[in-house]
Amino acid sequence: METRISKKKVKDTPSKPAPKRRTKKMARVVADEAALYDVAELFKVFGDSTRVRILFELLQSPLPVTGIADTLGLSQSAVSHQLRILKTNGLVTYDRQGKQLIYSLADEHVTSILSQGLEHIAE
């Protein structure tokens, strides 16, 4: 009995691709996605004109809720509500003086964001 060897070309069929492993690069991309989400949330805070007006008042000097409300012509309740959002997002801080809370910008980053925003729209 004779054995024949076929001379047909056999295509190399790729096997199923190996499942993707989480590499450091992929972990960094995921971390970057989380950071990008946080940045987007931060910019949402700047999307409200009342909050931006409050931030610009605090850029001038630290103020209590009553001072901000009087200057902007808003109710103390409305100002307190906006300050809570600003504080939650790390944009303002306060110092207690007796029963009064004196609000100020949290740090130089907030000042920088406000200044750069003004520069950008002035161009």
Image (cartoon, rainbow, N blue to C red):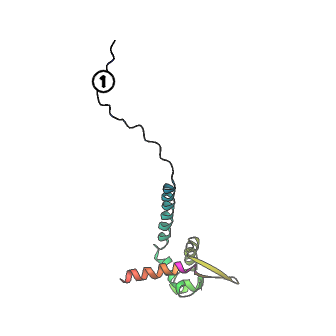
Q: Is residue 76 above or below residue 13?
A: below
Numbered disc 1: secondary structure: loop
Residue extending furthest toward the top: 1
Residue extending furthest toward the right: 98
Provide residue 35's location: percent of width, then percent of height: 51, 64
Q: Is residue 34 left or right of residue 8?
A: right
Residue extending furthest toward the front: 2
Region in magenta:
105-109
Q: Badge 1: how crowded within 10 Å, few (<14), some, or many (20+)?
A: few
Provide residue 26's location: percent of width, then percent of height: 49, 55
Residue found 61% across the figure and 78% down from its top: 93
Q: How many marks?
A: 1
Q: Is residue 33 left or right of residue 14?
A: right
Could you say which is closer to the camera, residue 45 or residue 32? 32
Three-letter code, disc 1: Ser
Quarter of the figure with residue 95: bottom right
Task: Give yes or no for residue 106 being in the magenta stretch.
Answer: yes
Residue ID for mark 1: 6
Provide residue 68's location: percent of width, then percent of height: 55, 84
Q: Is residue 22 above or below residue 86?
A: above
Quarter of the image with the C terminus is bottom left
Task: Give yes or no for residue 17 being in the magenta stretch.
Answer: no
Quarter of the image with the N terminus is top left
Could you say which is closer to the camera, residue 23 or residue 87? 23
Could you say which is closer to the camera, residue 77 or residue 16? 16
Residue found 53% across the figure and 88% down from its top: 60
Quarter of the figure with residue 103: bottom right
Residue found 38% across the figure and 38% down from its top: 14
Q: Is residue 8 left or right of residue 23?
A: left
Provide residue 89's location: percent of width, then percent of height: 56, 71
